[in-house]
Image (cartoon, helix red, strand yellow):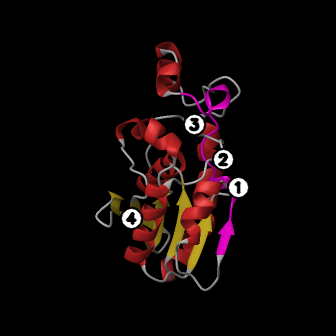
Amino acid sequence: MLILLRHGQTAANAKGLLQGRVDNPLDDVGYAQAAAAAAALGTVDRVIASPLWRTRQTAAALRCDRGVEYDDRLIELDYGDFDGSALGDVSPDMWDMWRSDSSYRLPGGESLDELRSRVWPALDDLREFSAASTVVVVSHMSPIKTAVQWVLGVDVEISWNLHLSTASVTRVAMRGTRAVLHSFNDTAHL
């Protein structure tokens, strides 16, 4: 089983800010969410996380004898000049371009195509191990939405129709080489 766990809440999440590559820590709510997720998941076979602080802290709460591995390919989308900004700071024209063209980059940032080109190979590398073991990937909203695209074999446009809560769990079973979505945005543990 491949379990995709979004990091717990940060102060920036609570304020509705685009975090991107800003390296914010969890807030008190985020620590409680990480502990609740860890309790719900129990002991797992492998934990792989984005290297940002909020995912490191969330991953540290999980029980795994192997410790935590880090993979730069699982880092959040780079919002460029808008990292740390409110959603409303991005002009409607930029949002429209971003939603209609997966190769569009916010100034100084990363496109959704570039995100996919790094996240999908990271997931492919976990296919075999997660078929026989429980692997938890601790990441961010955009990479997890991109992982859902990978599972379903759909285009990036689906991301705009998905809501992903902090500390939510998404489960993917592996049937041979085929990924099957078992649950999405599960927050029952919270």
> Considering the numbered disc 2 on the image, is that residue within a helix, a strand or a loop?
loop
User: CA separation, marks 3 and 2?
Assistant: 20 Å
Number of the front mark, 2 or 4: 2
Q: Is residue 83 left or right of residue 91?
A: right
Label whose residue precedes the other's in the sequence (2 or 4) = 2
Residue 112: image tag: 3
> Considering the numbered disc 4 on the image, is that residue within a helix, a strand or a loop?
strand
| Residue lying at 44% horizontally and 52% vertically, measured from the top left | 148
Q: Look at the numbered discs 3 and 1 and tell me whether their residues touch, using CB distance below 8 Å.
A: no
Label whose residue precedes the other's in the sequence (3 or 1) = 1
Q: Which residue is mark 1?
A: 72
Residue 96 in the image: state x and y as whole percent: 47, 19
Of residues 183 and 116, the one nearer the viewer is 183
Residue 180: image tag: 4
Check the image and report above or below for 160 versus 144.
above
* Dot 3 amino acid type: Leu
User: CA separation, marks 2 and 4?
Assistant: 32 Å
Circle 1 Cα neighbour tier, 10 Å, few/some/many (<14 / 14–19 / ≥20)? few
Label whose residue precedes the other's in the sequence (4 or 1) = 1
Label whose residue precedes the other's in the sequence (3 or 2) = 2
> Considering the numbered disc 1 on the image, is that residue within a helix, a strand or a loop?
helix
Give the residue at the far bottom of this rendering. Answer: 65
Q: Based on the picture, tell me whether residue 187 belongs to the magenta stretch.
A: no
Q: Which residue is mark 2?
A: 23
